[in-house]
Image: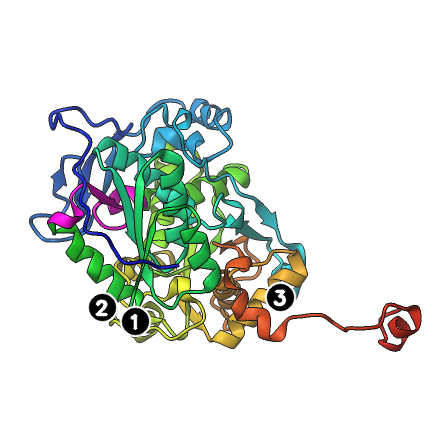
Amino acid sequence: MAVQVTATSTAPATSDASAPVDLGPAAALSCRECGERFELGPIFACQLCFGPLEVAYDLPTGDPQALRQRIEAGPNSIWRYAPLLPVPANVAAKPNLNPGLTPLVKADRLADALGVTGGLYVKDDSGNPTHSFKDRVVAIAVEAARAFGFTTLSCSSTGNLAGAGGAAAARAGFRSCVFIPHDLEAGKVVMAAVYGGELVGIEGTYDDVNRFCSELIGDPLGEGWGFVNVNLRPYYGEGSKTLAYEICEQLGWEIPDQIVIPIASGSQLTKIDKGLKELIKLGLVADKPYKIFGAQAEGCSPVSRAFKDGHDVVRPVKPNTIAKSLAIGNPADGPYVLDITRRTGGAVEDVNDQQVVDAIKLLARTEGIFAETAGGVTVGVTQKLIETGQLDPALTTVVLNTGDGLKTLDAVAPTTGPTATIKPNLDAFRAAGLAS
């Protein structure tokens, strides 16, 4: 369970500040707003305009076919894409959880239920080591933490990231101390605590947790700490690009026509778009139009509201939804999500909690995939987008399931259980009407 935060501080393990940083093809950090570039380091905001920083690369050049073959011959994990990520070339040999290369399920029965004729796929990231896509982003952040000499791995989390961070830290030999809202689903709390690190519950919402972490990072208490989604955020976010890489590789090096992505902070959606653009630039896939759609829960839908109202500014909200992994009321990447969905001809939509539960059950009974509430949001929004004519059912569509339903049992438990409870004899079985 959650514990009190300790006052222990740790200094970076690296004593030589002039030692070169080996993060593979990563060349610099670049401001998403003004374009100013900075040396690689544990910083996340532009010193000139305070815009968010992201990784800029010296990407491979040459024969795209040779690069494809190199990738395909690589490890069965995200490390097959090491030449495109901010990680050292020998990353696969280091102690890590080796996430990625999760199934892209051709969802024909779900397609029939939704009326999709152009091909429907579910990218099922519940198969990652801690059963969510967060293993991808944490794996990249761990390499940055190693490069910058941090000794404690930390984060603010709505649940999945806490578990992924705790597991990755245990495997890589870091101390961990992660922070969560005090009222998360029990399954996520237990999973985050079992890895032996410190788990701290904060009284408040995720946005309160995130603000606390921002304060801690500027205090001597936080010295030597790598916050994966704060001071390591530019590197952490790059892990989501691997979803784009895998989807295209699994489709035979083709970009799908439409992708539906859940929105929490919005980083996953923006980085999938970045990954698609990089694949096009490298010649690994043919350039073609694609549409990106964002999915939110109605009880925490600030980006959806801004999209529908035609606004460029996302107004914060107080979350109230069963989809707690998406319950970020002030999403950092919200404005960029608006830019991408509008640029690609997509949309941002939301569904209520009952629609989330219905969509979880629909995906489970049609494809045998038990999604957590975020997956229910994505499937539910896909259904709504089809019904409203915003998503073309005749085009190839990929829907993301980002986590395992075993983490959010409370969402479906009240309406899911035994069909019948009977005496142990055939007469009772017949009387229950289950024999046919």
**Left or right: where does residue 219 sit relative to residue 358?**
left
Question: In terms of sequence position, does the residue under pointer 1 or pointer 2 come before the other?
Answer: 1
Residue drawn at (45%, 53%) of the image: 191
Q: Which residues are magenta?
A: 220-236
Q: Position of residue 244 (x, y in %)?
A: 43, 44
Residue 64 % position (x, y): 42, 27
Instruction: Point out the image quarter for the N terminus.
Output: bottom left
Instruction: Tell me: 141 left or right of 378.
Output: left
Instruction: Return the disc, 3 or 2, that comes first in the chain's sequence.
Output: 2
Report the residue marked by disc 1.
306
At mark 3, the secondary structure is helix
Tag 2: amino acid: Val
Q: Which mark is residue 362?
A: 3
| Residue 407, position as x, y percentages in the image | 50, 59
C-alpha gap between disc 3 and disc 2: 34 Å
The amino acid type of the residue labelled 3 equals Leu
Per the image, the residue denoted by label 2 is: 313
> Does residue 276 appear anywhere in the picture?
no
- Determine contact: label 1, label 2, CB under 8 Å: yes
In the image, residue 377 lies in the stretch drawn in magenta: no
The crowd level at tag 3 (other Cα within 10 Å; few <14, some 14-19, many 20+) is: many
Compared to residue 29, the image places residue 33 above or below, namely below
- Which quarter of the rendering shows the C terminus? bottom right
